[in-house]
Image: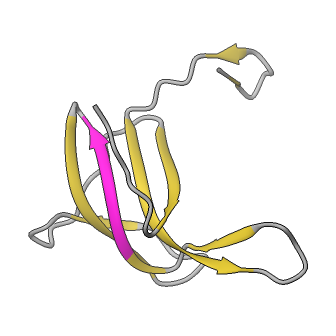
Amino acid sequence: MDRDASGALVQNAPKVVVALMVREVLREGGPYVNVATTGTGVAHIFQNGEYIEASWTKSAVEGELEFFDAAGKPVILVPGQVWISAVTVGRAVTWQ
């Protein structure tokens, strides 16, 4: 559940879920970890009841996040709500 722009509770129903494999970047002065969201890496994309192992690329913080399949073709995400979760490299992504 989440609140929409009017403040009403609505059910989240993502059309696409992406697990974005990212590097950890340790920050000084705090008990938290940043993740690198520029560069390239592996992405696990779930949409239309299918799994796509892909790669991601983003050249700058303000840049666009792009996904490519194993053949190097762009992965077009299904229109609708998209959830992207940053998962640090070395951790497993599993599903049923």
Indicate whether residue 34 is drawn in magenta. Answer: no
State the residue at coordinates (45%, 69%). 89
How are the colours assigned in the image? secondary structure
Q: Position of residue 76 (x, y in %)?
A: 26, 53
| 19 sits left or right of 52 in the view | right
Q: Is residue 44 above or below residue 36?
A: above
State the residue at coordinates (49%, 43%). 83
> Which sits in the foreground, 49 or 80?
49
> In which quadrant of the rendered view does residue 80 lie?
top left
Q: Position of residue 71 (x, y in %)?
A: 9, 70
| 69 sits left or right of 5 in the view | left
Q: Is residue 48 above or below residue 6?
A: below
> Which sits in the foreground, 15 or 49?
49
| 46 sits left or right of 85 in the view | left
Q: Position of residue 81 (x, y in %)?
A: 47, 35
Which part of the image, by quadrant, shows the N terminus? top right
| 24 sits left or right of 9 in the view | left
State the residue at coordinates (32%, 37%). 95
Q: Position of residue 73 (x, y in %)?
A: 15, 67
Indicate whether residue 43 is drawn in magenta. Answer: yes
> Which sits in the foreground, 31 or 21?
31
Range shown magenta? 41-47
